[in-house]
Amino acid sequence: MLGVRPGSTEQEVAAAYKQLAKQWHPDRGAGEEGTRRMAEINVAYDVLRAGDARDPAGATAPEPEGTRRGGLGGWLPQWMRRALGYELLQSLTEGEEVLVVTPASMSASPRTILAVTERRLLWLLDDAVVARVRSLPFRDVAIVQERRRRRHVSLTVRTLTGRRHVFHELRPHTAATIAKHVRPA
């Protein structure tokens, strides 16, 4: 998404991000297409930075086993399969379109990977021992609220049964894109 090669330095990734942000930022007149593209750019940048934080040596993580073309998640681009990881890919149904993948945090796990498909939210609680992948179909969503906290946004999703899921540390454009897809009609 950012147009950098695997193994690129942190400076190269930051430069690619800045270049794309100049082109697609909604404040620069890119409109709704710019909002969508900027959310994708932010997610790609966050995923790359999260990967560097987990692997300080900067080694490129191999593609999750079984995710090659035609295998698990074979309909998705390679960068998205890497961002999702094996457990979230296993939770997808064949051909399920993934719209957004982003790192987040929750009270249950400070390291969460959040994915939005065309019909549900999926998230991986990275610190959990069991039941690491959770899912929430959009039809079960009652309310979606965005709350800005300093530089990041918290996204609260309430279900029809009253259960509340709060995703923290989202970028504003990413949170707005997720809310737009999840918000009940």
Image (spheres, grey):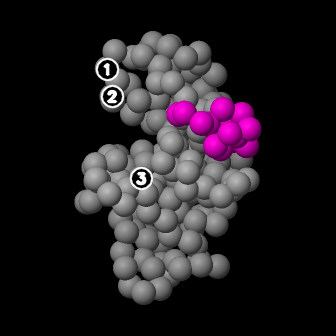
Marks 3 and 1, how far apart in space? 22 Å
Q: In the figure, is residue 121 to the left or right of 147?
A: right
Q: Nearer the viewer, mark 3 or mark 1?
A: 3
Residue 43 tag number: none
Viewport quadrant of the N terminus: top right
Q: Nearer the viewer, residue 137 or 148?
A: 137
What residue is shown with label 2? 53
Residue 165 position within the rendered picture, expressed as x and y whole percent measured from the top left: 37, 69
Q: Amino acid at mark 3?
A: Leu
Give the residue displayed 47% in from the left and 72% down from the top. Answer: 144
Q: Label 1 belongs to which residue?
A: 56
Q: Earlier in the sequence, mark 3 or mark 1?
A: 1
- Mark 1, residues whose alpha carbon is within 10 Å: few (<14), some, or many (≥20)? few
Closer to us: mark 2 or mark 3?
A: 3
The label number, if any, that marks residue 124 in the structure image: 3
Which x, y percent locates residue 157? 43, 71
Q: Based on the picture, tell me whether residue 167 belongs to the magenta stretch.
A: no
* 103 or 75, nearer to the observer: 75
- Element assignment for label 3: strand
Q: Are marks 2 and 3 in contact (CB under 8 Å)?
A: no
| Crowd band around label 3 with a 10 angstrom C-alpha radius: few (<14), some (14–19), many (20+) | many
Residue type pointed to by label 1 = Pro
Residue type at the position of mark 2: Ala
Sequence-wise, the earlier of marks 2 and 3 is 2
